[in-house]
Image (spheres, rainbow, N blue to C red):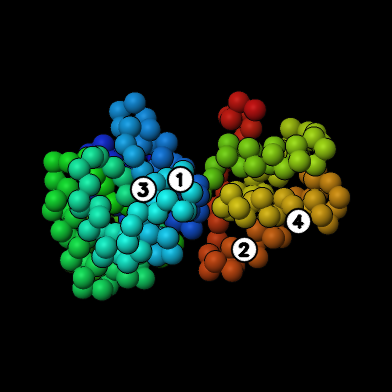
Amino acid sequence: MKEELSILIQAQYPLVYLLTSEEERAEAAVFKIAQSKTQHRRVFVWTVTHGIIEYGQPRQTTQHNTVSPEAAIEWVLRQREPGIFIFKDLHAFIDSAPVTRWLRDAIASFKGTEKIIILMSPVQQVPIELEKDVAVLDFALPDMGELNQVLSRHLEKNKGRRITTEAREKLLKAALGLTRDESEKVYRKAYVKAGRLTEEEVDVVLSEKKQLIRRNGILEYIEEDETLAQLGA
């Protein structure tokens, strides 16, 4: 997914719809792509609560009068430098005729430039006027490598407890299919219930995972056949 997003940015796609509920993780991935040797673009983030803020800057540095989506897109259009402009939860406003029109104007003006708007949302809402111009991309859930980092941080916080490779692998596979935040929560819950985190707590992780998946309306999750040996752990 990250490779595909990088390709879309390099190919100067003007509008990308990134489906995800993991805002922080997705923003970090976009910023990493933007700072690569082939890109090196500034990244800005828009929310209806704070307007446009450059990625990594405090909320007090919001750009003047960019809280409304129309004003924010107009601000983007006025920028001369290349940039990636992330709009969070614009799906709530995208059916508005002015917002749709501003986005279409942005698409037209971005031709031949290195400017791109990324609509980041857990809900896919694309007006028919934009269907031919937007690339829709699902932001992939964490793989075992990322979950391994989450688990390692959790173990370090709890007096640096060590577990066997077999236990680690079982705990990681049990969390596959969850977001990074969800995996952190289930590991904490398993630790609170048992006062430790070993392969004996895999059932706790699996039980909580089933509840989360059911809550999200997913009927089934097929686990990847990945091992720690493949991760180089």
Q: Which residue is drawn at 28% across and 51% down?
A: 117
Considering the numbered disc 1 on the image, is that residue within a helix, a strand or a loop?
Answer: loop
Q: Earlier in the sequence, mark 2 or mark 3?
A: 3
Q: Residue at x 64, y 38 (%)?
A: 148
Q: Which of marks 2 and 1 is nearer the N terminus?
A: 1
Asked if the residues shown at circle 2 and circle 4 are in contact, with their CB atoms under 8 angstroms apart, the answer is: no
Question: How far apart, in angstroms, are the residues tagged by discs 1 and 4?
Answer: 33 Å
- Mark 1 Cα shell of 10 Å, populated few (<14), some (14-19), many (≥20): few
- Mark 4 Cα shell of 10 Å, populated few (<14), some (14-19), many (≥20): some
Q: Which of marks 3 and 4 is in front?
A: 3
Q: Which residue is drawn at 56% across and 52% down?
A: 179
Q: Which of marks 2 and 1 is in front?
A: 1
Between residues 224 and 146, which one lies in front from this camera angle? Answer: 146
- Mark 3 Cα shell of 10 Å, populated few (<14), some (14-19), many (≥20): many
Residue annotated with mark 2: 212
- Judge whether residue 10 can be spotted in this image: yes
Considering the numbered disc 3 on the image, is that residue within a helix, a strand or a loop?
Answer: strand
Residue annotated with mark 3: 44
Residue 149 placement (x, y as % from top left)? 63, 37
Q: Which of marks 3 and 1 is nearer the N terminus?
A: 3
Give the residue type at disc 3: Phe
Q: In this view, does 36 lie to the left or right of 207?
A: left
